[in-house]
Amino acid sequence: MLAWALVFEISWTKFKNYGLFEASYACSVLAWALVFEFSWAKFKNYGLFEAGYACSVLAWALVFEISWTKFKNYGLFEASYACSVLAWALVFEISWAKFKNYGLFEASYACSVLVWTLVFEISWTKFKNYGLFEAGYACSVLVWALVFEISWAKFKN
């Protein structure tokens, strides 16, 4: 759902000038819902639920950077660096500093890969008309990888 929603919003904004900031709302809500389902509702684990904040902030930051670059010509690849650093910092704080859990820290790799892949796809699509739906694969991989890493590393489930 996250992948489809994000790609739909980005596609719609590209052709209809709907506003990329609206996409951040979809990403943020879906991120919270996904993490809430996997952590609170399923595992009754408040610690993992905290990861929802990281996902939410990442969604906002990513869309903000993309929106800013679109109008300010800052360069989408620069946005990937900012988002990548954010992903590493947030996951590190949540997992290592707070939970002292190296397994969850591994999830930062998934976040980092998502950011680079997603931004690359969007950048490539913008200039090469490669197809925004390919970006959906990047989003989908992130969701599965992140949840898998957190679930496996922390719960061995």
Image (cartoon, rainbow, N blue to C red):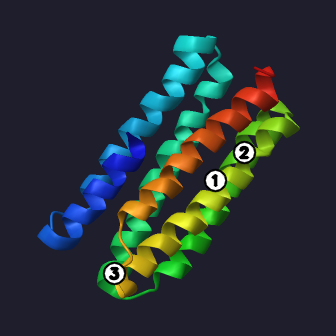
Badge 2 marks a residue whose secondary structure is helix
Nearest the eye: 8 or 72: 8
Callout 3 environment at 10 Å: few (<14), some (14 to 19), or many (20+)?
A: few
Q: How far from the left and from the top, in percent, is residue 26?
A: 32, 45
Q: How far from the left and from the top, in percent, is residue 129?
A: 34, 81
Q: Mark 3 against mark 1, which lies toward the viewer?
A: 3
* Residues under numbered marks 2 and 1 in contact, where contact means CB atoms less than 8 Å apart: yes
Callout 2 environment at 10 Å: few (<14), some (14 to 19), or many (20+)?
A: many
Callout 1 environment at 10 Å: few (<14), some (14 to 19), or many (20+)?
A: many
Residue 73 in the image: above or below residue 90: below
Say which amino acid is labelled 1.
Cys
**Label located before the other in sequence (3 or 1):** 1
Res 111 label: 1
Say which amino acid is labelled 2.
Ala
Q: Is residue 51 visible?
A: yes
> Can you tell which quarter of the image residue 12 is in?
bottom left
If the image is split into quadrants, where does the C terminus sit? top right
* Residues under numbered marks 3 and 1 in contact, where contact means CB atoms less than 8 Å apart: no
Q: How far from the left and from the top, in percent, is residue 80?
A: 56, 72
Q: Is residue 97 visible?
A: no
Which residue is rendered at x = 53% and y = 30% of the image?
35
Tell whether 149 sits left or right of 87. Answer: right
Badge 3 marks a residue whose secondary structure is loop
Residue 34 in the image: above or below residue 144: above
Residue 157 in the image: above or below residue 34: above
Q: Give the residue at mark 3.
A: 129
Q: How far from the left and from the top, in percent, is residue 113?
A: 65, 60
